[in-house]
Amino acid sequence: MFIGYFTERPYQDPQSGYFGATGKPIMDLTVSNDIYNPELGAELYNRYLDEKIYAEEMGFDGLMLNEHHGTPFCMGGAMNVEASILARMTQRAKIVLLGNILPIWDDPLWLVEQLAMIDLISRGRLVSGWVRGTGRESVAHNIPPHYNWERFQEAHEFVVKAWTTPGPFRWEGKHFHFRHVNPWVRPYQRPHPPIWLPGVVSRDSLMWAAQKRIPYIMLATEMEPTRQAFQLYHDTAAELGYESGPQNIGYLWKVHVDETEELAEQAGRKYVQGPSNPFLAGNEGTVNPALLGLPGLTSRTRVLPTQAVATGARGGAASVLGRPYERQIQDYTIISGTPKTVLPKIRHVLEYIRPGSIFFWDGDGAMTHDDAMRSLRLMGAEVIPAIREMAKELELPGPFEVDPATGKPLEAQPAAAATQESGHGTSA
C-alpha cells in the first residue's frame, strides 16, 4: 500500500475576521486580496513545508500537493514551486501532484519543462497528476469552460509526447500549436513520470483513466459513491481486456490522530472551521452557485452515481457539501481519535473500498501547527506501521508494488529503474 499526506494549506488569519477559527463564511471568489498579509503568508508557506518534511520523516510514502486559484482555503496557487522545494529538501517520499489543472495552461510546453525539472531534482520521485479544475479556476484564468474537457485531453497527449518523443517535432492541435517542440530537459523516469488522475464522480474522467490505465484517486467522497465509482473503473478495465485492482485506485479522506480523545475531538472539529472551504462540510455559505453551472464544464448526465447529484456532488467532493461534522464522523469521511480508536475505522474504510493508495487529509481548516505535528508524530509511531500490516492482510498492493498498466508485480528497485523497466504509470 502507498500512504500519503495532504493538506490544503489554508490561509489562516484570525485578525481578519474571515479566516479564524470562528470566522464568518465567505462565498467563493468574493473576497478581495486587499486583506492579504504577506508576512503571515510567508510564515504559513514555511509552516506547511516544514510539516511536509516532517511527514517524510514519519514514514509517509508520498507528499501530496494540490492547486486552487483566487481563494484563501488553498494557498497552493503554484504548487509546482512547492514541489520544486520539496524535490530538493526531501530524500525518499514521492512528490505527488494531484494535480496540475491542464485546461488552464495556454502553454503546456512550459509545464513539460517544469515537471521534468522536478523529476530530475528529486531523482525520479515525481508522480504527476492532472485535474480538470473547477469553475473557480476557469473564471480565475479566463479559460472558456466549454472547452475544458477538450483542452484537458489534448494537453495530456501533448505532455506525454513531449516527454517521450525525441524532438524537434511540430504540434498542430485544436487548442495548442507549436512549431518547434524540443525541450532541453527530459524526465528522470522512463518513459515518463507516473500519471494519476484525482477527481470525484465524473463518468468521463473515471472511464478515461481506466482507458489510459491511469490510477484514479477519489477525493473526500462518501464511501458508497466511492465504491460504485471504483467498480465503474474496474468494469471499464475488464471491457478493455485487462484486470485492474487496488493498485489502480486510491482514496483521500480526513484523518486526524491525537494524544487523547478530548484533543482529537477539539482538533477534528477544526476541519469545518477556519477559511471557508467548499470541500469541507460545515462551512456553509461558501459555495458560489455561479461557479457550479458554467456552461459545458460539467455534464449533468455524466456524474456517477446519480444519487450523489441530489446531495450536492456537483459542487465538489461527492455529497459532502453542507454535511455537519457529526454526520461525517458517522460515515467515516472524518476519522479523528487516538491511534487505538482510529485504526479500526481506517480498517473499515480499507475493507469497504479496497484502495491501494490512501492519503490522510490533516492539518486543515483551523488546525494549528501543533495539531498537525502531534498527529504526524502519532501516525509515524503507531498508525502507519499498523496500516502496512492491514494492507498485507487485506491484499491491497499499491501502484509501486503492482504495475497499474499490466497488473504484474514490480520488483523492489530504485524508482527510476523500476519505471524504465516496467513502464508503469504510462498513459500512451
Image (spheres, rainbow, N blue to C red):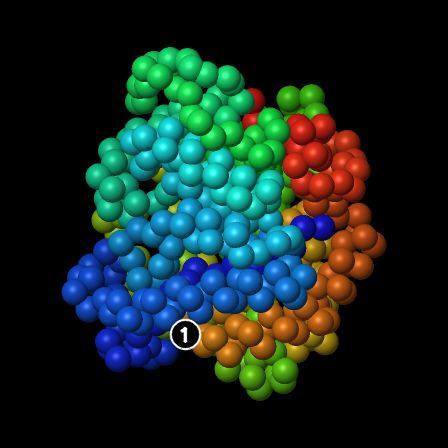
Name the quarter where the C terminus is drawn: top right
Q: Please state the horizontal and vertical placement of residue 102, each as a whole percent of the image.
A: 38, 35
Image quadrant in which you'd find residue 284 = bottom left
Side of 274 where 99 appears, left or right: right
SS type, badge 1: loop
Is residue 222 visible in the rendered image? The answer is: no
Q: Which of 206 and 232 is in front in this view?
A: 206
Q: Which of 143 and 199 is in front in this view?
A: 143
Residue at the spot x=58%, y=66% of the render? Answer: 54
Within 10 Å of the Cα at label 1, are there few (<14), some (14-19), or many (20+) other Cα atoms? many
Image quadrant in which you'd find residue 393 = bottom right
Compared to residue 75, the image places residue 375 above or below, namely below
Residue at the spot x=50%, y=67% of the render? Answer: 50
Is residue 88 visible in the rendered image? The answer is: yes
Q: Please state the horizontal and vertical placement of residue 232, each as a whole percent of the image.
A: 59, 35
- Residue, far right: 393
> Looking at numbered disc 1 in the image, what kind of residue is underneath it?
Ala
Q: Nearer the viewer, residue 389 or 100?
A: 100
Compared to residue 245, the image places residue 313 above or below, namely below
Compared to residue 261, the image places residue 271 above or below, namely above
Residue at the spot x=32%, y=22% of the render? Answer: 176
Side of 107 where 379 appears, left or right: right
Q: Please state the horizontal and vertical placement of residue 147, each as a whole percent of the image.
A: 30, 29
Residue at the spot x=29%, y=48% of the render? Answer: 136
Image quadrant in which you'd find residue 406 = top right
The total of numbered circles placed on residues is 1
Give the residue at mark 1: 366
Q: Please state the horizontal and vertical placement of residue 331, each as a whole percent of the image.
A: 58, 64
